[in-house]
Image (spheres, grey):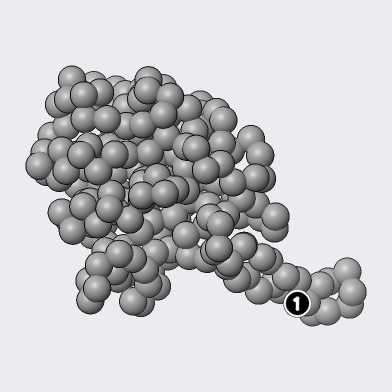
Amino acid sequence: MSDAWIDISIPLHNGMVHWPGDAPFERIDTLELAKGDSCNLSQICGSAHTGTHMDAPRHYLLGAAGIETVPIAAVAGPARVIEIRDPELIRTQELEPHRPARGERLLFKTRNSSHCWRTHEFHRQFVHLLPEAAHYLVQCGVQTVGIDYLSVGGYENGAETHRILLGGGVWIIEGLNLEHVEPGYYELVCLPLKIAGGDGAPARAVLRKLVL
């Protein structure tokens, strides 16, 4: 195992890209040493689904579990980064040769990482998981799925993909930046804020190369 950790999180900052209609991230200084206050202090607000974050089942499923229930095993442990060649969609045909295994944590590196994060403007055409591919991952028993933009599902039809994965017991990480990560096996740590009853939460995600 390499000693070098790779930060695959998106920094939170004012003016950053966010899902259309969601509250944008905002950090406001409420106390400042430079103005004679006793300390620097700020408040933050915005959507729980901004930047690197996780979705909880209750995000799309009525009465389902909140983000505080995420098992540590789902977000900490070996993970596989799979590079998706298709410039538009993640399809079952491209996933099948990788043979997703029961309990795996899979992170999908797409053209999103080198394309979508370069601007503060939201990209409606981003690589995402088709519902049929989501069904396939559920059938394979995958534990966690991560993707390198703000949604695992598409802009127009993302709800179905979310419901399939979350209803099938798959935890979702969104908003990763995998531009400088090579495909392969890694140790993953991705801990969302423990918000009671939360439909999602911001997270810090890091990888460390596994030497097999």
Residue pointed to by mark 1: 30
Q: How far across and how far down the image is residue 201, in percent?
A: 43, 63
Q: How many labels does the image show?
A: 1
Which residue lies at the image location 56% right of the left edge and 30% below the top edge?
A: 115
Is 190 left, or right, of 36 in this rendering?
left
Specify few, some or many for label 1: CA neighbours under 10 Å numbering under 14, 14-19, or 20 or more: few
Is 64 left, or right, of 20 in this rendering?
left
Q: How far across and how far down the image is residue 42, in percent?
A: 69, 72
Of the 4 image quadrants, the one containing the C terminus is top left
Of the 4 image quadrants, the one containing the N terminus is top left
Q: Which of 50 and 209 is in front in this view?
A: 50
Which residue lies at the image location 61% right of the left edge and 62% below the top edge?
A: 24
Q: Which of 189 and 160 is in front in this view?
A: 160
Q: Is residue 67 above or below residue 173?
A: below
Which residue lies at the image location 50% right of the left edge and 37% below the top edge?
A: 125
Q: How far across and how far down the image is residue 78, in percent?
A: 25, 37
Q: Can residue 210 be seen in this view?
A: no
Q: In this view, does 33 lie above or below 189?
A: below
Quadrant in which residue 46 is drawn: bottom right
Which residue lies at the image location 25% right of the left edge and 67% below the top edge?
A: 61
Is 146 left, or right, of 23 in this rendering?
left
Q: Can residue 123 be seen in this view?
A: yes
Q: Is mark 1 on a helix, strand or loop?
A: strand
Q: How far across and how far down the image is residue 172, in percent?
A: 31, 51
Q: What residue type is labelled 1?
A: Thr
